[in-house]
């Protein structure tokens, strides 16, 4: 198997909170490291109005970053009804490839932080907005795979999306895939106790998978740095290829790119436009 950082390969981090404060002062260096490793772009989900507004004001660094807007259940204490109107405006201004990060988390209920009713209150309008704008959804789902997948199926949601940090069963993964969603995988599969997840990733269709870091969180088992970074993506690709008994990193990278463009069609359009514009410069 060729080296994970082979320059000819192009990887993509499908879920990276590169706008979080922890990256201040190191963001440029972390992106340079990722780019050198072969990471061609990142998707930055939105979690709250305040963070999205800050992201929209930040000068572009010329990086291939695709910014979304969404209201995450962890930030329910900050959300206001007016944020829903802002969300539509932000999605259009950012030319977002999807709506999110939105979702349901049973652990928030068990800890007494946020009720399930409150989480549904903020999730439903985002589903409606995705339908209105014909955009995919980026979902945070913990302990609610069956409920949310069944709800979207009954609703006949047809725009697909990404179930980020997937840790469900093979059966749940297949149901999401049938509904048009990809499953985000990353650092969790590297931990010794994640044998069930690794078996699930071996059994699921490779067409159902996308790589993500969830930076700065979900650091892999093989690094002492508590801040996860996009440069981990090629290493995750090598691990996934080994799990799938694939001899070629080029093969898994190509499949993952096809998955990315299928789930987020506007990224494929942008990629084609950039290729054409670059050809004019040559």
Image (cartoon, rainbow, N blue to C red):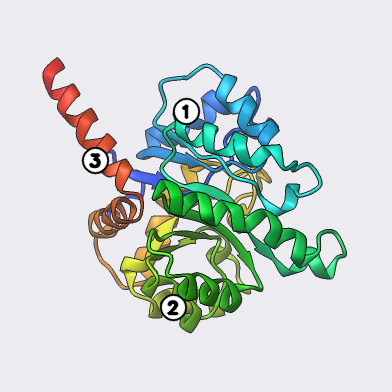
Q: Nearer the viewer, residue 131 or 234?
A: 131
Is 205 placed above or below 66 here?
A: below
- Residue 165 position within the rendered picture, expressed as x and y whole percent measured from the top left: 56, 61
Disc 3 secondary structure class: loop
Callout 1 touching callout 2 (CB < 8 Å) = no
For the point 42% across and 62% down, which residue is it?
239
Dividing the picture into quadrants, the one containing residue 180 is: bottom left
Tell me: 183 left or right of 47: left
Q: Quadrant of the C terminus?
A: top left
Q: Residues within 10 Å of mark 3 (few under 14, many from 20)?
A: few
Q: Quadrant of residue 17?
A: top right
Disc 2 packing (10 Å; few <14; some 14–19; many ≥20):
some
Q: Quadrant of the N terminus?
A: bottom left
Comparing labels 3 and 1, the label whose residue is closer to the camera: 1
Q: CA distance from mark 3 to mark 1?
A: 33 Å
Give the residue at mark 1: 93
Q: Position of residue 274 (x, y in %)?
A: 23, 29
Can the viewer see residue 282 in this picture?
no
Point 64% across, 49% down: residue:
217
To which residue does mark 3 refer? 8
Q: Is residue 192 above or below residue 73?
A: below
The mark found on residue 198 in the picture is: none
Residue placed most toward the observer, 157 or 275: 157
């Amino acid at each position: 198997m060729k080296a994970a950082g082979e320059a000819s390969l192009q990887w993509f981090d499908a879920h990276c909170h590169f706008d979080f404060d922890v990256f201040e002062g190191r963001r440029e260096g972390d992106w340079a490291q990722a780019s050198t490793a072969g990471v061609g772009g990142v998707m930055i989900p939105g979690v709250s109005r305040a963070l999205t507004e800050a992201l929209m004001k930040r000068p572009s660094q010329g990086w291939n970053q695709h910014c979304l807007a969404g209201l995450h259940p962890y930030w329910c204490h900050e959300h206001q009804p007016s944020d829903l109107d802002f969300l539509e405006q932000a999605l259009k201004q950012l030319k977002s490839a999807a709506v999110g990060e939105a979702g349901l988390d049973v652990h928030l209920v068990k800890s007494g932080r946020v009720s399930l009713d409150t989480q549904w209150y903020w999730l439903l309008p985002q589903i409606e907005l995705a339908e209105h704008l014909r955009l995919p959804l980026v979902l945070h789902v913990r302990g609610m795979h069956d409920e949310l997948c069944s709800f979207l199926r009954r609703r006949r949601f047809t725009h697909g999306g990404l179930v980020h940090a997937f840790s469900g069963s093979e059966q749940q993964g297949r149901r999401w895939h049938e509904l048009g969603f990809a499953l985000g995988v990353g650092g969790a599969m590297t931990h010794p106790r994640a044998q069930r997840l690794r078996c699930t990733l071996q059994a699921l269709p490779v067409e159902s998978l996308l790589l993500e870091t969830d930076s700065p969180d979900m650091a892999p088992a093989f690094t002492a740095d508590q801040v996860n970074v996009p440069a981990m993506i090629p290493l995750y690709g090598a691990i996934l290829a080994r799990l799938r008994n694939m001899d070629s990193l080029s093969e898994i990278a190509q499949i993952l790119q096809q998955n990315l463009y299928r789930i987020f069609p506007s990224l494929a359009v942008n990629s084609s436009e950039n290729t054409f514009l670059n050809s004019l410069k040559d």
